[in-house]
Structures are given as structure tokens and as C-alpha cells.
Image (cartoon, grey):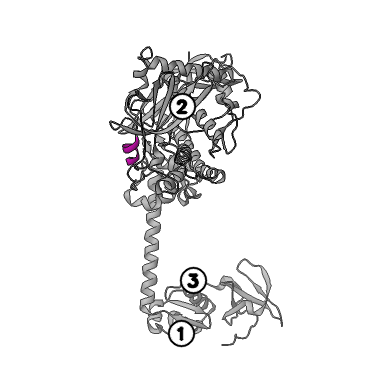
Amino acid sequence: MSQPELRLDTLVLYKNRPARLTATGDKKIEIQTEDGKNVSVRPKDVEVLHPGPVRTLHELHPVQGEVQDAWELLAGGVTTVAELAELAFAEFTPSTAWAVWQLVEDGLYFSGTPAAIVAHDADKVAGIQATRAAKVAEEQAWQTFLARLQQDHYAPEDERYLGDVVALALEQREQSRVLRTLGRSETREEAHALLLNIGYWSILNNPYPTRLGITTTQPTYTLPSLPEEARRDLTHLTALAIDDAGSTDPDDAISWDQGHLWVHIADVAALAPPESEADAEARARGANLYLPEGTIHMLPAAATTQLGLGLQEISPALSFGIELHEDGTLGEVDITPSWVRVTRLTYEEAEKRLAEFPFQELYGLAQAYLARRRTNLAIEMELPEVKVRVENGVVTIKPLPPLQSRILVREAMLMTGEAVARYAQHHDLPVAYSVQDVSADAVGAVAESLSEMFALRRLLKPSQQKSAPGAHAGLGMDFYTQATSPLRRYNDLLTHQQLRAHLRGETPLDAQTVMERIAEASTSARAMRTAERLSNQHWKLVYLLQHPGWSGAGVIVEKAGSRHLVLIPELDLETEIYGRADLALDSVVHVTLTEVNLPTLETRFRLEG
């Protein structure tokens, strides 16, 4: 259908708004818009609503009519602006023409163009009405939800709106319509705070493993039975598995054998050889995830049941017989699959028996090895350590005393790591060596006070896994590889797989494959260590929320003007305190809790006295 003739003072439609034609031309016309502006446009940019004359757009007044009657007469048909104006408003004027177009724009009863207006059938109108009603109801529900949030509570039906807040709090998305509408920052901390304020999350919600993308379900696949193979019978030796109270996955034990040290390690590689389902799953997880609320294992529970040392009357192990010279250097090492009879006990129980056989002899070996590491400028620090546990929502924090029995076990494990590294070099067996450089300021540094240890810790660099042997300067060791926790760390399991292949006369993995698997596992393991650190901090703050007004001793470990970094040994917690510029490093101060910000993992304490 052709465009009606364009004449002066015609009412036209421009960008769906009314305009008045003020000048004509072959290629351009002039129109006046609602705001009084004159605009030059092409004829095809406008559509005629009424031939006029329209002297001013102020003549367009609202009109009343029988719109529904007109729709019922036309339902399913096609009409024009003029015809619909006559039917709905009994006349065709500039005002009724504009009113008709507003009906078309509304879209309930009519749609189309000025020259061809479609009258919707009844079903379509009913559908549009239902959609609009639902939209109104949804908007009302949204506004009601926002009003509830402003009053710091929510209703069960609000969960669908809170989804984006939860996802942001867990770092599963970057934006939140809810926070944006409330005028709050779209950050994980703000999302966490909102969920706490309204009671959707409690303080017991630990978001950090999920934020870091860590699997928090236990592995459930089936492990094979222990393979039939020759094992040396070492059950005549007293094998001691010394661990923290409550430990459920004992994977190492030590024995004294006529001047030699035997270190027995759970023979995990016997059930998780390379290319097995267990190997792939353990590699993907990287390590056990130790959280105050529980442990997520990298291997199924059956692995601990079958291989945990001391959980059965006789346990399978991969045993390392180590000769230690008087100067603390290592001699021969004997590696063999074995059977061992293990006695389990805690560090505290072992501490009381250090004067007995074989504890005294084992501790003597540990002291000789430690002396050699010190000669090699090993870096020693005794910073506070605590064990954080959560049971039935109640947090407990238990300081770990620096027991000599811990030194005994630690040195035996380090000795094993060096022995395996030397064995691998001697037999050209590819393993991952743990290598650490230290800054020049840290070499030979002796830290005695807490502030000195704290400063020294800042100088240390992370250890790295390399295919070529190298020194681990922090430990004061020329060679070292991780080999004593295959139930807990994939790196150790991979080392055991290589050792077992060598002992059985099989072809081990090549160096490139070893490092590729180490790299894959290390990515997950690093995320786990971060999750553990942040989770421990989270639960320490929950502990403080459960003990409002907590007070205790702190030690100033760093200062800059009036800013003091205070370490609270009882909690192994660092906090900043301002004021009292006269306080010296290592001053012991009494502090009282004043504020806990759980989403930001921040605390505030005040100095007493």
C-alpha cells in the first residue's frame, strides 16, 4: 500500500512518536517533534497518521472510546488507523489517530503498521493478558523480596532470587542482580555478608573449598585386592606409628634394628599402580584435603582400611632400611615390600617414653641427622601451631606443643626422603626432586624470637618439584624427594610407583611423564593448601564469634609506626592493632576481641593496659 501524500501540517509518526510536517522537499522533509525541535529527515523515515491540519502537537489530547467493542468487531481482521479511530472513538481526528497508534504500541488488542493494523484474536489477547499478569505478579514478588532483604530476613520462596548471590559468594559467577539492585558492591565478600545477615547462611558455612573449585565428595570407586607378591617379614621389629590424637590415616611407622633405622610406609602403589583408576583419581585430586570439619581423601576409604599401618594386625608396607653414620650422613639404603606389625600411639604418649628402648635409640638417630642439617644451615623456626576442629558446629582450637617426639618423626621422614633421592640417582630412576633456593638474607640466618622467625618466614621461597636433583636449602639437605605420605599426597604415591617398578624389574615412567603428572597433581594440591589455610582462618573466626569478648596474650612480631602486627599464639592468628608506638618487637600484650568480619576474614582487637 502506497504512502499517503505528505502535506504541510500532516500528523506523522517518527520513531514511534508523533511529529508535525513543517516543510516538504524531493529528498528531505522538515518535521517538528514533541520537544519543539525541527528535524530534517527522509520521507521514508515517517509514516502518516492523519492528514491534518495539525497546527501544534499540543492539540493531541487524550480521548475516551469503546476500544474493546471495536476490537471485538474486528477480531482476527486487518484495519487502518482511520477505520479503527471511527470504530473506537466515533471520529477520525489527529487526537484519535494518535490514540489508535498508542493502542497498537500497547500491543494487547492490536499490532502492525498505520496502514495495516491487525486485530488479535481472543486466544492471543488472553495469552498476552496472562503474560502481563504474570509479569506484574513477578515484579510484586521481586519488590516484596527486596523489602524483606532490607529488613535482614528472607522467606522460603526467595531462594530463586538468592541463587545469584550464592553463586557470587562461591565465585561461580561475577555479577548479582540482587546486590546491584540494592546498590551494594558485586563482590564475594558482600554476597557472603548478605547471606549471613539474612540468615540464609550461618557462620558454619565454609565457602572456600567450593570457591577454589575443589572436589568435596569422597571417592567411592572400588580398589583391587592386594596383589600376591613376595614381601619381607619384618614383623619381629617394633614398628611405631606416632601421630596426632584422632588421626585416622596412619601411613608411616619407624623401627630400630641394631643401629639401623627402618621407616615403613603404607604400600599404596600396590593398589594404585600407574594408569589405574585410583592413580588417575588421586592425580586429579592431588592430595588429601584437611579441613577442620573433616578430611576429604584422595583415595577411597578402603585404601586406608587395607593399607593404613596398624589398622590390621599385620600391615603391608614399603619399608626403607637406612644406615646413618655418626656424622649424620646416610649410608646404605634397603628398600623392600614388607609385612610389619605396627603399634599406634600419639606424640604425647611417645614423649613420655623417650628414655625407653627403642624410643631413646631412635631419637638419638634423629638428633644426629638434625645436627647435620643444622651444619648445612637448615632454617629452623618454631612458630605457634594449633589444631582446629569442628564437631556439631562447635569449634575447638588446641595448641600443638613443640614435642621432641615430633622432631623424632620429622627427622625420620626427612631421612627417608634423602635416602630415596640418593637411591633414585644411583639407579637412574626418574622421580621428582623437591628443590628450594633461599634468599641471600636467609642463608645462615638464626631466628630466636617470634618476630625474627616471622621475618625469616617471609624470606623463604616455595619449594619446587624438578626432574634434576638439587639442594633443598631450607631443610639443609643436598637431595630430597617426597616419599613418606602416599595415602595423603600424589607426589609421594608417584615416587612409590617408580620404586615398585624398579624393584620388580619393570620399566618405570620416563622423566617427562613423571613431571607432567607432578604438574597436574600440584595444581590441585596448591588449591587444596590454599583452601586449608583459608578454611582454618574461617573457623578461627567462627571460634571467636562463639566466644565474644575473647581476650588473651599476643606478641608483636612486626611494627611500622603506630601499626603493630600481633601474633596470638593461642589461636595462631595474626591481627593488626594501631596505637602505642612505644611497644617494641616481641612485646607481650593483652588483647581483647572487639570485632569479627567473617566474609573478609578480618578481626579487630584492642590493647588492654
Tell which of 278 and 161 is nearer to you: 278
Could you tell me which secondary element the residue under label 2 belongs to? Answer: helix
Where is mark 3, residue-wise? 62
Where is mark 2, residue-wise? 413
| Circle on res. 78 | 1
The answer to whether 498 appears left or right of 22 in the picture is left
In whole angstroms, how far apart are the C-alphas of marks 1 and 2? 89 Å
User: Is there a contact, CB below 8 Å, between mark 2 and mark 3?
Assistant: no
Residue extent of the magenta highlight: 302-307
Tell which of 86 and 545 is nearer to you: 545
Q: Nearer the viewer, mark 3 or mark 1?
A: 1
Quarter of the image for the N terminus: give it. Answer: bottom right
Could you tell me which secondary element the residue under label 1 belongs to? Answer: strand
First in sequence: mark 1 vs mark 2: 1
Number of residues whose C-alpha sits closer than 10 Å to that of mark 2, classed few (under 14), some (14–19) or many (20 or more): many
The answer to whether 314 appears left or right of 388 in the picture is left
Tell which of 593 and 392 is nearer to you: 392
User: Is there a contact, CB below 8 Å, between mark 1 and mark 2?
Assistant: no
- Residue 389 on the magenta segment: no
Amino acid carrying mark 2 in the image: Met
First in sequence: mark 3 vs mark 1: 3
Give the x, y percent position of residue 329: 54, 21
Residue plotted at (45% across, 46% down): 274
Amino acid carrying mark 3 in the image: Pro
